[in-house]
Image: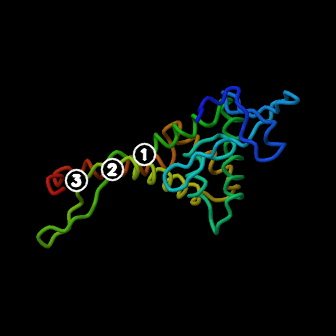
Amino acid sequence: MNTDHSNTQAPALDDELAQTQVNEDGSITLVQTGEPVQGPAPVRWVGSKLKPDPRHGSLLISKFVNCLMWDGKKSLAEGIIYQAMDQIKEKLSTDPLPVFEQALENAKPLVEVRSKRIGGANYQVPVEVSKKRQQTLAIRWILEAVRARKGRATHEKLAQELIDCYNKTGTTIQKRENTHRMAEANKAFSHFA
């Protein structure tokens, strides 16, 4: 079978399909008229059936939307995220996606303490945090900080918290620093890990 689709016609199922042509870039052209017809974008499934968000094409935003979502109201969560992104763009006069990604990167903890029972005593043992858990904790802490703020709309609180994380200030960064400080204080018990 010829795999070069540059100038070949699609298999004829009926007259309409026989008149289409698949180009090198994946677009479809009608052979009779020569007008390009764009098909739907290819769907990329990553991880546990997670699709990129429609506006930015980011898996990270899609995961954040899913974590923000309550009672299955995904469109409401997406609206909150997109309004927050618009507000970040307005306040910082820059593309909000790198700001969002850097804010999450700044909120990720490197070490945390885990309670371990040894010889009848509980010790707080510092352990390194895996990449997946770093991301999970960063998202969780940002959302906790947003939900703890009172008096404003959620998208405003989220935009402000993301800007604070981007600038390495705010509640989420304080929580990260406290986690690191706790791990440093219990460094003597690291041999129990």
Mark 2 belongs to which amino acid? Val
Q: How is the image coloured?
A: rainbow
Query: Which secondary structure lies at badge 2?
Result: loop
Q: Foreground residue, 180 or 56?
A: 56
**x, y percent for residue 57:** 63, 41
Residue at x 37% of width, y 51% of height: 178
Mark 3 → mark 1, Cα distance in angstroms: 20 Å
Q: Are marks 2 and 1 in contact (CB under 8 Å)?
A: yes
Query: Which residue, given by chain and number where applicable, does mark 3 sit on?
Result: 186
Query: Which secondary structure lies at badge 1?
Result: loop
Residue at x 30% of width, y 52% of height: 182
Closer to the camera: disc 3 or disc 1?
1
**x, y percent for residue 8:** 70, 30
Q: Foreground residue, 190 or 12?
A: 12
Query: Which residue, given by chain and number where applicable, does mark 1 sit on?
Result: 108
Where residue 129 is drawn, which disc sits there? 2
Which is more N-terminal, label 2 or label 3? Answer: 2
Mark 2 → mark 1, Cα distance in angstroms: 9 Å
